[in-house]
Image (cartoon, rainbow, N blue to C red):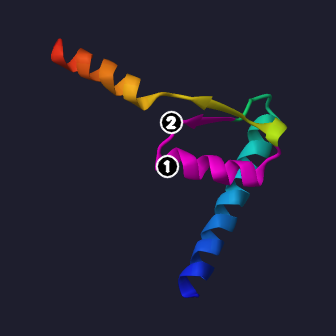
């Protein structure tokens, strides 16, 4: 139960941070974008954002990290 309370507190803090950040930057005309790669980190971020904001308040873009890793490898081998 102790960990559950700690995690719930962290989640609520994260949701508040996302909402405050959205309000600050959307008021300046910025669009809210979530970069999603399919990995654990971006999955958690997307989950938090969809809890904090309405679907029309953000856009999700997908970046294929396998393809990016392949091109990075090509660039390194050509150095």
Give residue 11's position: percent from left, percent from top.
Answer: 64, 65
Give residue 71's position: percent from left, percent from top.
Answer: 32, 18
Residue underneath mark 1: 41
Calculate the distance from the C-alpha at mark 1 to the C-alpha at mark 2.
9 Å
The residue shown at (56%, 37%) is 36
Magenta residues, start to end? 33-54
- Asked if the magenta segment contains residue 44, the reply would be yes
Q: Which corner quadrant holds the N terminus? A: bottom right
Q: Residue furthest top?
A: 78
Contact check, label 1 and label 2, Cβ < 8 Å: yes
- Asked if the magenta segment contains residue 49, the reply would be yes
Give residue 64's position: percent from left, percent from top.
Answer: 47, 28
Height in image: 64 above or below 5? above
> Secondary structure under badge 2?
loop
Residue nearer the viewer, 14 or 48: 48
Give the image quarter of residue 70.
top left
């Amino acid at each position: 139960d102790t960990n559950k309370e700690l995690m719930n507190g962290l989640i609520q803090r994260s949701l508040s941070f996302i909402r405050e950040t959205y309000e600050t930057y959307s008021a300046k005309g910025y669009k809210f974008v979530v970069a999603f790669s399919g990995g654990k980190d971006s999955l958690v971020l997307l989950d938090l954002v969809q809890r904090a904001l309405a679907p029309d308040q953000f856009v999700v873009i997908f970046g294929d990290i396998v393809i990016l890793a392949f091109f990075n490898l090509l660039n390194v081998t050509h150095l």
